[in-house]
Amino acid sequence: MNILVTGGAGYIGSHVVEELQKSGFIPIVYDNFSTGHAAAVSEDVQLVEGDIHDTVFAKHIMEQFEIDAVIHFAASSLVGESMENPAKYYFNNVEGSLHLFEAMRGAGVDKIVFSSTAAVYGEPENIPITEDSKLQPTNVYGRSKLVIEGMLADYDMAYDMHYVALRYFNAAGASFNRNIGEDHSPETHLIPLILKTAQGVRKHVSIFGTDYPTNDGTCVRDYIHVCDLAVAHVLALEHLLKGGTSRVYNLGSENGFSVREIIKSAKKVTTIDFPVVEEQRRPGDPAVLIASSNKIRQELGWTPVHSSVDTIIGTAWKWHKDHPQGYES
Ligand code: UDP
């Protein structure tokens, strides 16, 4: 089966491409390299440089490679940037997705796995967060993904395009093969920032807020290993290919860790006592985000197996040590 992976040269996309190959699928990566890295795509994977806005070209590629289904990662994903430049997020994420869905319709491709986010929930009313929780994103990035989920539901209703939307909590870690990992520019995520500090690439780790109503005053998040996420995408794809109906699932480990706990684990795993500075809260950060992943566990049999914090940080640490400058190393 041939699977078009938009944004397959990005962090989560490249790990899903690896998992697709392991599972016997043929991934075709479609990426415009605005943030992706050609080096993240293995040499034996077909790589197409293209933009999701280009409906004509995307349709042509879907027909040329006889695509059976799409996994759609291509998006802008920086929360802070989304607040300063919402136009970029509505253009790249919402409008880009619309053009991609039109290309799919034109090419007769009617199955899609969509990369969504826990940011669609905003400040949660209950923990753990279930899929039927209120959807009230507090940032433009989350709102753009929620709009796309709505578009998918409408395309399903009107055109029978079936989808699985996967709402990720905090993706982290790196492939066990040590060949691909997280390389964002600019980097804003906690674990890579911690490891760059342990390496001496950055001077200190900032803790954003120590006065949250949590056990140690710092924010609690649900960290999920990127390889566990990758397996969920293959299960979602298989569900659609078997004729399954559209679904929305959370993907988290169901365990919460505070910023201080992550720093403590990183000091243990790296055996480096790097400097830490306490700072003000970062605007828009909810105190606690923990998923219920019960729905995908029950319906698709997904079980995260690599998502202990030590394994997440251990695999990410190996990647960072091998690639101190990311893919440019
Ligand atoms: N965080 C922090 N210092 C940093 C980056 C992040 O204290 O340099 C905190 C952030 O406030 C949040 C958690 O770490 O509570 C995870 O942040 P990240 O940006 O990795 O993911 P998010 O939860 O925003 O998707």
Image (cartoon, helix red, strand yellow):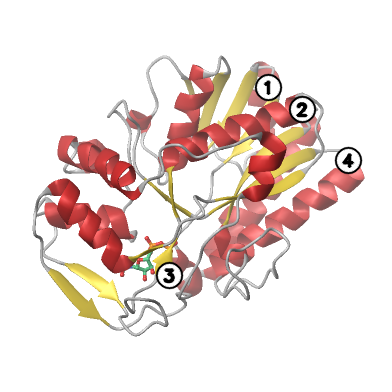
Is 126 located above or below residue 228 in the figure? below
Say whether disc 2 or disc 4 marks the residue closer to the N-terminus: 2
Element class at badge 4: helix
Residue position for label 3: 80
Between marks 3 and 2 in the image, the one whose residue lies nearer the viewer: 3
Is the CB atom of the residue marked by disc 4 within 8 angstroms of ligand 1's nearest atom?
no
* Residue type beneath disc 2: Ala
Q: Name the foreground residue: 174 vs 79.
A: 174
Q: In the rendering, at what x and y percent does residue 167 appear?
A: 60, 52
Q: Name the foreground residue: 15 vs 60.
A: 15
Between the C-alphas of marks 3 and 2, the distance is 36 Å
Between the C-alphas of marks 3 and 4, the distance is 35 Å
Residue at the image point whose x is 53% and y is 50% from the top: 75
- Give the label on residue 277, or none: none
Residue at the image point whose x is 70% and y is 21% from the top: 63
* Residue type beneath disc 1: Ile
Q: In the rendering, at what x and y percent does residue 4 appear?
A: 60, 28
Between the C-alphas of marks 3 and 1, the distance is 35 Å
Residue position for label 1: 67
Q: Circles 3 and 1: CB distance less than 8 Å? A: no
Residue position for label 4: 159
Residue position for label 2: 107
Say whether disc 3 or disc 4 marks the residue closer to the N-terminus: 3
Q: Residues within 10 Å of mark 4 (few under 14, many from 20)?
A: few
Between marks 1 and 2 in the image, the one whose residue lies nearer the viewer: 1
Residue at the image point whose x is 40% and y is 46% from the top: 35
- Left or right: residue 114 compared with residue 280: right
Quadrant of ligand 1 in image = bottom left
Q: Circles 1 and 2: CB distance less than 8 Å? A: yes
Residue 10 shows up from this direction: no
Say whether disc 3 or disc 2 marks the residue closer to the N-terminus: 3
Q: Residues within 10 Å of mark 3 (few under 14, many from 20)?
A: some
